[in-house]
């Protein structure tokens, strides 16, 4: 009888443990708060159409899907933004290679990790009465900031006119709209402007002095630039940023309606004609996978004969190479119906 009671007690204990285990198994696992998105401050020189890949990635929720919260900030000039990047006040900058060269020449250590435009997209507009090289000589040419693409391409425009930088005075004037107003008023004699403000200037009858757009000059016009040390220290974060930006670019290239809606909103374009031109201009210059042009980089470095001419001192495509090797480019091309270059 005693042995019976022992077995009964043991059996009862097993049943109790079984019930408790079953109840415990049915309880949901403790869930902590979702991880906070990583903050990225992305600077731009001006709200222009070459930023469309970033604008689209943000609008389509692609940055959020990568666990990022990207704040796009207008730095009112490429070189100014590059200096803010070097000082670690922003994390990435939309700026041409000329500004990278300038900062690195002064002791900085920036690298282009991608490109949003590989050709010059500037048209040089001039003030009333400035129609020839002789009219421009001795006058002021406005640029966004010293060392920016609007500054370095002044040299090319002057060559077309048979002039040199010694024949004019270059002054900083900030964003495209401010420079356009300064040209219209005659405060400055000429300035370089790209879309969408270039179309607005044409619509307002501002004189075109030199148009570099038809020449399709290879140029690392709008780079995705970071601090060199971050390529190693924040590799995963920058890879996620590039993945979202590249997919944003694919959407912009393949969905004209959606792209124009984003352009109209971000660049405050109300004219359908200007919107069409701005989008068409974007498509003509945007590298599908954000790969920088080596020839474009070489053309810029020729303007800076006293600095290192080694491409690797300014460009690092290791993140893009990683994405390419992982099949990301091919997957994007297939997803959006484009041929993989």
Image: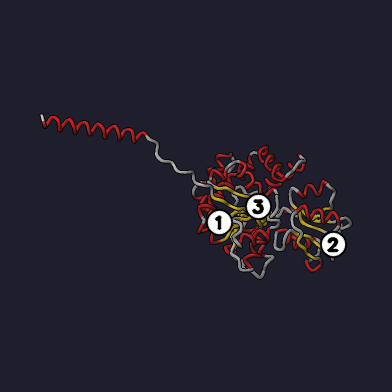
Q: Is residue 141 visible?
A: yes
**Chain-order first, disc 2 or disc 3:** 3
* Residue labelled with disc 3: 73
| Residues at marks 2 and 3 touching, judged by CB atoms closer than 8 Å | no
Residue 269 lies, with reference to residue 177, above or below; the image says above
Compute the Cα span from label 2 to label 3.
34 Å
- Percent across and percent down for residue 332 are 55, 43
* Residue labelled with disc 2: 136
Residue 265: which quarter of the image?
A: top right
**Chain-order first, disc 1 or disc 3:** 3
For image coordinates 30% across by 35% down, the residue present is 21
- Percent across and percent down for residue 58 are 61, 44
* Residue labelled with disc 1: 317
**Chain-order first, disc 1 or disc 2:** 2
Toward the viewer: 41 or 200?
A: 41
Toward the viewer: 160 or 5?
A: 5
């Amino acid at each position: 009888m005693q042995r019976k009671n022992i077995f009964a007690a043991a059996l009862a204990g097993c049943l109790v443990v079984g019930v408790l285990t079953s109840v415990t198994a049915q309880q949901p696992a403790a869930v902590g708060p979702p991880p906070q998105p990583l903050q990225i401050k992305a600077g731009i020189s001006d709200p222009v159409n070459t930023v469309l890949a970033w604008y689209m990635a943000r609008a389509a929720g692609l940055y959020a899907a990568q666990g990022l919260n990207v704040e796009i900030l207008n730095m009112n000039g490429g070189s100014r933004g590059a200096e803010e990047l070097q000082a670690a006040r922003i994390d990435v900058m939309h700026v041409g290679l000329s500004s990278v060269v300038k900062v690195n020449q002064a002791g900085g250590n920036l690298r282009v990790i991608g490109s949003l435009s590989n050709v010059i997209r500037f048209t040089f507009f001039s003030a009333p009465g400035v129609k020839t090289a002789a009219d421009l000589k001795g006058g002021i040419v406005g640029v966004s900031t010293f060392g920016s693409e609007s500054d370095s391409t002044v040299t090319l425009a002057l060559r077309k006119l048979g002039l040199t930088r010694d024949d004019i005075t270059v002054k900083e004037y900030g964003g495209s709209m401010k420079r356009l107003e300064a040209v219209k008023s005659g405060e400055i004699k000429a300035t370089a402007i790209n879309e969408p403000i270039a179309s607005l200037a044409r619509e307002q009858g501002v004189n075109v002095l030199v148009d570099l757009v038809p020449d399709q000059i290879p140029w690392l016009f709008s780079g995705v630039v970071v601090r060199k040390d971050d390529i190693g220290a924040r590799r995963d974060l920058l890879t996620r940023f590039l993945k979202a930006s590249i997919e944003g670019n694919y959407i912009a290239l393949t969905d004209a309606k959606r792209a124009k809606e984003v352009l109209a909103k971000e660049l405050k374009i109300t004219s359908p004609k200007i919107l069409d031109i701005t989008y068409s201009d974007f498509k003509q210059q945007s590298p599908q996978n954000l790969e920088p042009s080596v020839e474009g980089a070489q053309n810029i470095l020729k303007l800076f004969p006293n600095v290192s001419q080694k491409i690797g001192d300014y460009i690092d495509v290791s993140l893009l190479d990683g994405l390419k090797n992982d099949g990301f480019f091919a997957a994007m091309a297939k997803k959006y119906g484009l041929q993989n270059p």
